[in-house]
Image: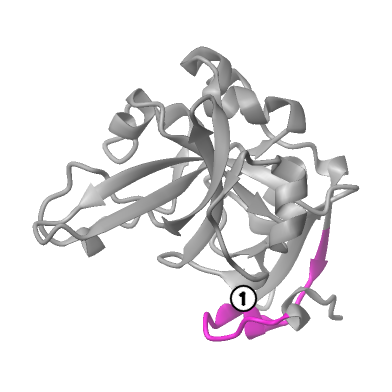
Amino acid sequence: MCQRYVIPEQLVAEREFLPSVAWWRYTPRYNVALTQNVPAIRDYAQSSEAVMLRWGLIPAWVEGDAAAWQVASVRMGRVPQSEASADAWAAGRRCILPMAGFYVWHLTADNYRQPFFVQLRNRSVFGVAAVWDRWVSEEDDVIESCALITVPANELLSELSGPVPGMPAILRRRDYATWLQGPTGAALAALGTYRSDWMLTHAVSPRVNSTEVDDAELIRQVG
């Protein structure tokens, strides 16, 4: 599972994903939480565009209070048929969320939830598979939102977090285009559990527990 994550500098993300059109404007953030706007890459005329989406998927068919629908993630095996994501999946609304890392929490023997920062070896920026949808309210307000895809956790994250639903579906660079524009079968085949030995983790300050805190010190190793 991924409850909070870190987004990279805009120029670094653009060098990684090479969007044909960049509409986004943002600064690095170190404690991204549900309902906040996040950078995303999605299909644009068989190329790609860089946009900002709200994290917390609101399906297009939702009526009334959209706040009741804020789906952070969908399991890989449930994406095509989940109530939240089925329509977006059928319409080919896939996207990629740029990340510099994410947080997990380890329950210690003293019943303390110690946060850990997770990053990749030799990749300062990486892409996580996601789906997006466009919701329009009765007042014609528009919210474009997204939910990341999760896959079974690897040994490292299972050891840290225990029996968790999964981990973010980290894409290999060669699979970016397949996820955005490939047939559904090929897109699903691009998803998989990222190897433990390709990841690094370290304990960080419990300051990350507050969504009001967002600075570079959050990813600094402690202990």
Residue 66 in view (yes/no):
yes
Q: Which residues are magenta?
A: 201-215
Given residues 121 and 145, the one toward you in this image is 145
Task: Report the residue marked by disc 1.
Answer: 111
Residue 187 on image: x %, y %: 55, 21
In the image, residue 215 sits, relative to residue 128, either above or below, namely below
Left or right: 133 as drawn, with respect to 137: right
Question: Which residue is painted at 41% across and 33% down in the image?
Answer: 93
**Residue 205 shown in magenta:** yes
In this view of the protein, can residue 108 be seen by the observer?
no
Element under label 1? loop
Is 69 placed left or right of 128 in the picture?
Answer: left
Of 24 and 101, which appears nearest the observer?
24
Colour scheme: one colour
Q: Which x, y percent locates residue 88?
A: 34, 34
- Say if 222 sits above or below 121 in the image: below
Q: Residue at x 32, y 27 (%)?
A: 81
Q: Circle 1: is it few (<14), some (14-19), or many (20+) Cα within 10 Å?
A: few
- Residue at far front of view: 21
Residue occupying image coordinates x 60% and y 18%? 189
